Each structure stands twice: as C-alpha cells, then as structure tokens.
Amino acid sequence: MMKLYYFDIPGKAEAIRLLLAHAGVQFEDIRFSFEDWPKHKEKFELKQVPVLEVDGKQYCQSIAIMEFLGMKYGYLPKKDFCKLSKVMFIVNLAEDMFSKVYPLMNPGSFYDEKSRTETLDKLLNVNGPLYMKALEKRLKESPCKKFIVGCKYTIADFALLGLYRTLQTNPEWNKAFAERIKEKYPLVHEYAENRIRDFNPLYKKCNTRLYYFDMAGRAEMIRITLKYLHQPFEDVRVKFEDWPKMKTSGKFELQQMPVVECDPCGVCLCQTDAIMHRIGARFNLLPLKKPKKLYRVTWWCNTAKDVMEGCFREFQPIPEDKKKEMRKQFFEKSVPTFLSVMEQKLKENKTQCHLVGRDYTIADFYLLGVYRAVINNPQYPEFKAILEKCPTLKGYFEKKDKEL
C-alpha cells in the first residue's frame, strides 16, 4: 500500500490526495504535527515533505510525484504534447501561487506583521489577478468548461483544487480571495466550486465511533487496525453498569458489542469478524483475488478467535466447579495445540514479520488483538509457560506489540 507523508493540513500534499482518491487507490495518509516534524525529517532524502512511498521506495517533490501518478493512472496526455504543455503550465502556475501564499499562512515564517500586510496586498492586487486572468482565459478556451484542460481530469485539475482547498482552510485568505474570484472571475469560481463538490465525501468530518467495554476484548483488533490505517475514530468505552440501558436503545442490532457506527451515512456495523473483513476489503488488507492466501488469513483469524473465546467461556453462567474444570482442560489441551500449530505456520511463512505473505493483513491485527486481550493478560497466567515453548511466535508478539 502506498504511503503519503505530510503535515496535517491540505498544503502541497492535497493535490496528491485528491488524485489518489479519484483514482480509487488505497493509501496511508500519514500526517505529522509541526511539533513532531523534527523527529521524522531525517528519514526523508531532502528533509522535506510531501513524500510518497511506493513498495518501500520514496518519491519526493510534489510536481514530480504528480507526474509519476498522472502517468500511472491516466491523468497525463501521453501523445498530445500540446495538451501536455497546457497541463504543465497550470501545474506550475498553481505551484507559483502556492509558493507565494504558503509563507504568509505559515505561523513559523520570517514575515513580521508589516511585511505580511504588504505581501498580502501585493498578492491580492498584483500577482493574484494575473494568475486568475490566466485561469479564466484557459477555461474560456477549454472545450469542456468542467475541466481546465480538455474534457477529463488531469493533474492540472488536482493541482488547482489542492491550492483552492488550502485557501479554503484559512478564513482570512478564503474571504479575501473568494469574494474577488466570485465577482471578477466567474468561470474560475464556478469551476472550483463544482469540482470541489465532486470530492465532498473526502472532506466530510469523520464521525466514526467504536463502541465496546473499557477493555481489550473483542474490539482490540479493530482499534489496532484503524490506528494502523490512520483512520480517525472515537473510541467509546462503555461502563458495565451503563450497558443494560444502552443495549436496548435501538443502536445495537444484536444487543451486543463491538459496534462501529459510521456517520454521516448512519450505518452501524456489528460482529467483530464482519467488521474486520469490511475494513480489510476497503483498505487492501485482504487478498480477495488470491483464494489460497485468503484461506490462510481466515485460518489465522478463526484460530486466534478460538483462543480468545476459550478464555471467555468462564464468563458464562455455569457452576464454579465446572468453570475450573473447563479452564484446566482448555489450558492443558487446547491452548498448547493452538499455539504449537501457530508456531509452525509462522515458521513456514516467507517472513516471520507477518503471518501471511510479506505484508500486513487483518490476520496480523486480529492475532495481536487476541494477544492483548488474553494471551498477555495477567488474568490468564497459564499462557506464559506455554508461549515459552513457541519462541518464534513469542518473538512475533513482542515485536508487533511495540510496533502497533
């Protein structure tokens, strides 16, 4: 899966995000805070972002990344050099304007208040109109006013929309530019508003909520997966005393948790395995086109689930003596079998860094969730001695618990 590194703002990465979203490409949108940036910058060749990572290789410089993705996903005219020239004119125009806007928007820039005011005035009254006139002219010349060059999306559109989104997020700039553009450059205004509307789903505020008790349990693998994917969500921890009232509220279809609630669509997802499979399919963590690999992923998930559910049986309303006997048999017979087979399966994989293949799948997150819920839980000390006999599996757990 591709990884895109940038700050938690639209900025120079927004055009790349828009292109990948339009192309339907799954990618990790890794965002740094400005405070954390010094901790990360040394791992990037030019000590700057955006950086796109593909198959472990880093690509830098925003325009170069746009050209690479444009060629890869069909957003650059390959044979019409005249049209290619028009596209690159717009891309570089957007870059020029961005380079003038960004220092003024950056609170850490060297501009004092007087310099900011003078530069802003020049941009609004000199450079800005120059750029807008050029865009208005191109839209008039375009055979299809829906796009800036030709009759379909090119990297030129994403470059302009990335700039527009950056301006939108700053109230001062948005007000200053929006009013003038609407009044003096109607084609630019209509173009930008209509194209941004195409991407509205990308910008809807995330109101995803995960409901479960204040423990690892059957929700931990979901939490791990969402955090790995950098998908924001509200981790709603329900108190045991509040649950009887909540479960009859109508929100919980089967009157059980975990449940993932997705707004604004209002969908409530239940059943841990079903939720994990949906996330896996959505974010390329399931090998759906490779039946043998898919079988192995499902095997790991189901076997991990068997270990967890075996531990949870003691919460059933059965006599205490029966519970003790069940637990004794489970840890003397079932758990050694489960863990020894897991140990062998992990050794047989191409790498012991992952359970299936060379990349993360939902199997890794599911098993780590079970590790945190029961295997590494002081409530079940019997696991420790059994795990000592499975050194490869133990090493895997220790490494992943730190990574994730």
Image: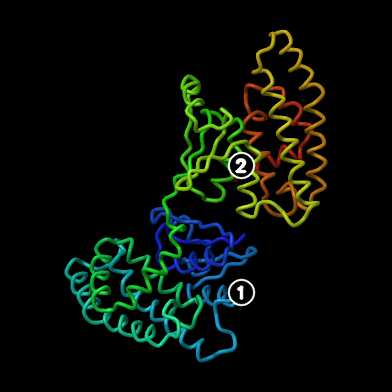
Judge from the rendering whether residue 286 lies leftward or rightward of residue 160; answer left or right: right
Q: Position of residue 313 (x, y in %)?
A: 69, 21
Residue at image mark 1 = 72
Seen at 59% across and 88% down, the residue is 79
Amino acid type indicated by mark 2: Ile
Residue 112: image x %, image y %?
Answer: 21, 67
Residue placed under numbered mark 2 in the picture: 275
Out of 141 and 237, give the one closest to the viewer. Answer: 141
- Along the horizontal axis of the image, is 238 left or right of 355? left
Q: Residue at x 69, y 44 (%)?
A: 363
In which quarter of the view is residue 222 placed? top right
Which residue lies at the image location 82% right of the left edge and 47% below the top edge?
348
Front disc: 1 or 2: 2
Q: Kindly indicate the quadrant of the structure image that contains residue 194.
A: bottom left
16 to 381, vertically: above or below: below
On the rendered image, what quadrant is the C terminus found in? Answer: top right
> Mark 1 to mark 2: distance in Å?
32 Å
Residue farthest bottom in this picture: 82
Front residue of 49 and 30: 30
Percent coordinates x, y for residue 333 in the rendering: 82, 23
* Colour mapping: rainbow
Disc 2 is placed on an element classified as helix
Q: Local crowd at mark 1 within 10 Å, few (<14), some, or many (≥20)?
A: few
Marks 1/2 in contact by CB < 8 Å: the verdict is: no
Amino acid type of disc 1?
Lys
Front-most of 131 and 199?
199
**Callout 2: 10 Å neighbours few (<14), some, many (20+)?**
some
Residue 346, above or below 337:
below
Under tag 1, what secondary structure?
helix
Residue extending farthest to the left is 114
Residue appearing at x 33%, y 64% in the figure: 168
